[in-house]
Amino acid sequence: MEKSDRGLFGTKIGVILATAGGAVGLGNVWRFPFVTGQNGGAAFILIYILCVLLLGLSVMLCEMIIGRHAHANTARAYTILANGKPWKWIGYLGVLTSALILGYYGVVSGWTLQYVFSSLTGHIHGTPEVFKDQFQSFISHPIEPILWLAALMGMAHLIIVRGVEEGIEKASKIMMPLLFILLIVLMCSSLMLPNAWKGVEFLFKPDFSKVTGKTFLEALGQAFFSLSIAMGCLCTYASYFSKDTRLTTSALQIAGLDTLVAILSGLVIFPAALSVGIQPDSGPSLIFITLPNVFEQAFGSVPVIEYIVSFSFYLLLTIAALTSFISIHEVSTSFLREELHIQRKNAARIVSCYGIILGALCSLSMGERNWLTLFGMNLFDFFDWFTANCCLPIGAFFTCLFIGWYVDHKIISDEMSNWGTIKAPHLRAFTFMVRFVCPVLIFIIFLHQFGVI
């Protein structure tokens, strides 16, 4: 294996676990199960998998090709392949996107860490109204959420400064298996509840009557965001791939693990919720208001079980948040390290301090500091809306055009065939997808998010 002063992932399993960890995040746990239940259960899952194969894998491969070929941070990687042309700004957009996400996503990730502490100390008890009041009081507090944000940022920082192989890869080899162990334990606990089969049916029983044109758009959008496309994470991590890493195989494995986490999360949430007659909500209310009530009703008769389930679930959430948070952090860290020519630890310090400051402003904007707004939204909501609805689809759209129409086809062929050492029978299909199909699908998603279609 070739050496690099930037660092490389040391093992094949390290490549998969680290990159999959970058894709797996909080959206897998709260958004996928809810959207699945609303859109026909198993029917939606089938459509979602089709969308991953059509859209997700192709755009993932685009970013991986760019990252590994250039062996540079996201901005420089696009610049190298663009040969000074305006295409280079796609890479800078990816860095900007991850830098903006770092702030508000860090706030939510900090919330999960606080709930780990609360469940560990046995302080998650009460009625639905109490859970709601507790959550609203916590997120609007001027100090507490920022302290938990700083704690999570510190955890990510300690991993980032150790480098690619000794930091990111080693941490992923611990956290990702632990995440799956917790998922399986929690799934088994939920499935043993009375009437748990209602939740399984809710998730897996096909209901094609709910399938509409909007279902396909929802599935496309979920595939797009679940795989962390256009955040710079895939491109940055691919720059640490060795020459013998099989890009297509890796993309399939990463997408498969990402989808598996989402489905297992559904098997944790729906059986537990429907066994006690509670309809799951979406977004933060599901994680921080509804589920504490579900756990108390479902497992409260045996306090030790409730304690273990609650703690395990929020530990699971924190791990999912941390693995993706590390990948977002690394995008900016690698950018500063290579563009400013400073040591990794100093680049990481700058990014961590920046993330805490931006996250603090986002957190404060949800409390009494209602003057912290942009375009009529508090900072937290604005950065969430702007990155999800504008930056990500625009970045992915132009990445497809860049690979499909500008980059030398020999570069693509060499990367996908590992310089002729393996077969790449899917090369023509990939080229067709990124030239014609993916840009159209991404453009449709973009219009759908603004209510145009």
Image: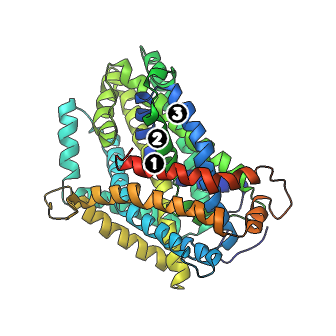
Determine contact: label 1, label 2, CB under 8 Å.
yes
Q: Which residue is mark 2?
A: 217
Percent x, y of residue 166: 62, 65
Q: 175 or 337, which is in the foreground? A: 337
Identify the residue position indicated by label 1 in the image: 445
Q: Residue at x 33, y 67 (%)?
A: 356
User: Which quadrant of the structure image shows residue 247?
Assistant: bottom right
Residue 365 x, y percent position in the rendering: 21, 60
First of labels 3, 2 by sequence position? 2
- Residue count near mark 2 (Cα–Cα under 10 Å), binned few <14, some 14–19, many ≥20: many
Residue where numbered disc 3 is placed = 264
Q: Position of residue 214 (x, y in %)?
A: 43, 36
Residue type highlighted by circle 1: Ile
The residue at 74%/73% (across/down) is 3
- Which kind of residue does numbered mark 3 sit on? Leu
Q: Amino acid at mark 2?
A: Leu
Asked which secondary structure carries label 3, the reply is helix
Query: Looking at the image, how many numbered discs can be counted on the residues?
Result: 3
